[in-house]
Amino acid sequence: MMPNPLLDIRIGTMVRANLEDPAAYIKQILPLGFESIQPFFWQTLGGKDLPRLAGQVRDAIGDADVIVSSLGVFGNPLESGDVDQGVLKAWETVIDNAHLFGTSMVSGFTGRIRGKKLTDSLPRFREVWGKLAKRAADKGVRIAFENCAMDGNWASGDWNIAHNPDAWELMFNELPDENLGLEWEPCHQLVYLIDPMPQIRKWAPRIFHVHGKDATVRWDVIREHGVFGRLPFAQMRTPGFGDSDWTRVISELRLAGYKGAIDIEGWHDPVYRGDLEITGQARALDYLKQCRGGASYLPNPV
């Protein structure tokens, strides 16, 4: 089969692995044209048997040209509560079983020492992720840190320190391991009024996975109410409905040599949610494919 360079960057979606039957969900959405999926867990595995789930996911994909781009775990593995310890165990289990899903990447939050300034988390970050990075490297797995602040900031937070480029500098100085990188998206930069485009050029070697999520900055609200008023000054959006020029984003990723997936992260758009969730995601899928250069590869004449 002729190689398809369009698929150097696949357009896919995230799938809640904590669902009772995520494989059934996958079967329903794949006919829409998704090219990759990212099953993800909220905090713990919820009792899921990963080898069994991997088999169910493979069966759901069948002969379709669809990959599992990454497995996700979103929780706080740096703290010591019962749930937090479950998050850490989930990371270990997902790293050990990623190959059963046909992927070599796992992703999620770094975690954080709750209620403390960001730099107070660095010693614990080094301790926990140093071990996880080695565990992953021994299995040929890369780790991508999601860049969501989860309403935290530099002074305090509950979930994640990997939300700011200054924090990335500190993190990768602590742990320069080559298998540690970023799960990047423009949304989480726009909501902090950071221009996401220069980040691609600077941080491309550390961008391992991309989430398809955008934002709208409501400058009229900022001018009238500021950023600490009663109205939200930014809204998270599904791609195609936000401020980012994804043709530019994908072009810069290609120029930087990125090969991987852009998986749509739904369930955040204030308009295309609820009954309109998959309608919005299907529109984003089509939009991102067009920004990539189209849905179909056309070989050059010979």
Image (spheres, rainbow, N blue to C red):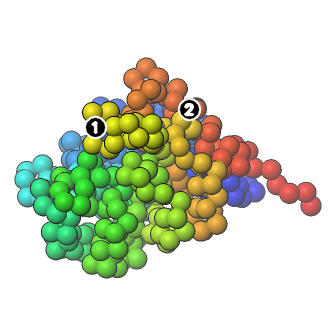
* Label 2 element class: helix
- Image quarter hosting the C terminus: bottom right
| Residue 178 placement (x, y as % from top left) | 40, 77
Please indicate whether residue 94 sits to the left or right of residue 238 in the image.
left
Q: Residue at x 20, y 64 (%)?
A: 118
What's the residue type where badge 1 is placed?
Gly
Question: Is disc 1 surrounded by few (<14), some (14 to 19) or many (20+) residues within 10 Å?
Answer: few
- Across and down, in percent, residue 227 comes to 32, 44
Q: Can residue 6 be seen from the camera position used here?
A: yes
| Residue at the spot of label 1 | 229
User: Where residue 277 sits in the image (x, y, percent)?
Assistant: 45, 27
Look at 27% across and 33% down and name the residue there. 230
- The type of residue carrying mark 2 is Ala
With 173 as the anchor, is 220 left or right in this view?
Answer: right
Q: CA distance from mark 1 to mark 2?
A: 34 Å
| Residue at figure coordinates x 55%, y 47% from the top left | 244
